[in-house]
Image: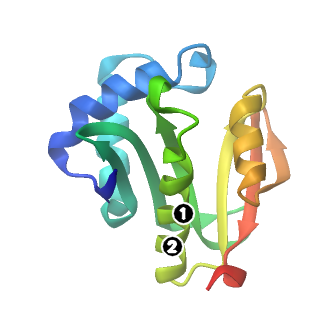
Amino acid sequence: MIIRRVERGDIDHFVEIYIEAYRGYEEYAYTSLKDIRGYFKWLYGRDRDGFFVAEIEEPVGFSACDTNWFSSMERTKVAELHELFVRKEFRGKGIASKLMERSVEYGIERGRRIMGLWVGEKNEPAKKFYRKHGFRESGKMGKWVRMTRMLHDQA
């Protein structure tokens, strides 16, 4: 498996895997092709150096870490993990963990001390995964739960 930075040409794989990954959790996802493609472009424009794809012959997962994000919750710039997902048949093989590790490394490279994310309140598998990677719940807004972890102790 390799992890590399996303390129514009990865958009079709992103859309396909995104739809599959959010099946059953559509209340937390974009559902129209136009919106998902727009989301890819937004992520690419926010911080393309922190937008990663895991490949095993072809793309199997994505993560998007935005180090330009100012978080009103933490009142500072953070490494915001906007997205992390893996194709269903490749789950449980450490791919999401490798994408997370690369995102954390990127946040540290960019001098961020905190990594944050929002996860759907009913998305228990995702919350369990994030807890395993050192995140703790730090707030709630509507159907979203805020989770954060410190990065400075990883340098």
The percent position of residue 140, horizontal first and vertical second, equals 83, 43
What is the number of the mark on residue 115?
A: none
The residue to which callout 2 is attached is 105
Q: Residue at x 18, y 46 (%)?
A: 8
Q: Is residue 35 visible?
A: no
Q: Residue at x 54, y 84 (%)?
A: 111
**Tag 1 secondary structure:** helix
Task: State whether residue 127 is above or below residue 100.
Answer: above
Q: Is label 1 in contact with label 2 (beta carbons under 8 Å)?
A: yes
Compared across the picture, whether 60 is left or right of 115 comes to left
Q: Residue at x 84, y 51 (%)?
A: 137
Task: State whether residue 92 is above or below residue 66.
Answer: above
Task: State whether residue 145 is above or below residue 123.
Answer: below
The residue to which callout 1 is attached is 101
Residue type beneath disc 1: Glu
Compared across the picture, whether 125 is left or right of 58 comes to right
The percent position of residue 59, horizontal first and vertical second, equals 29, 38
Q: Is residue 62 visible?
A: yes
Quadrant assignment, res 113: bottom right
**Tag 2 secondary structure:** helix
102 or 57, which lies in front?
A: 57
Residue type beneath disc 2: Glu
Compared across the picture, whether 133 is left or right of 46 comes to right
Quadrant assignment, res 70: bottom right
The percent position of residue 54, horizontal first and vertical second, equals 36, 48
Neighbours of disc 2 within 10 Å: few (<14), some (14-19), many (20+):
some
Compared across the picture, whether 16 is left or right of 151 comes to left
How many numbered tags mark residues here? 2
Please state, as top left, top right, bottom left or bottom right, where the C terminus lies in the image.
bottom right
Neighbours of disc 1 within 10 Å: few (<14), some (14-19), many (20+):
few
Give the distance between the C-alpha atoms of the residues marked 1 and 2, in whole angstroms: 6 Å
Q: Residue at x 32, y 34 (%)?
A: 14
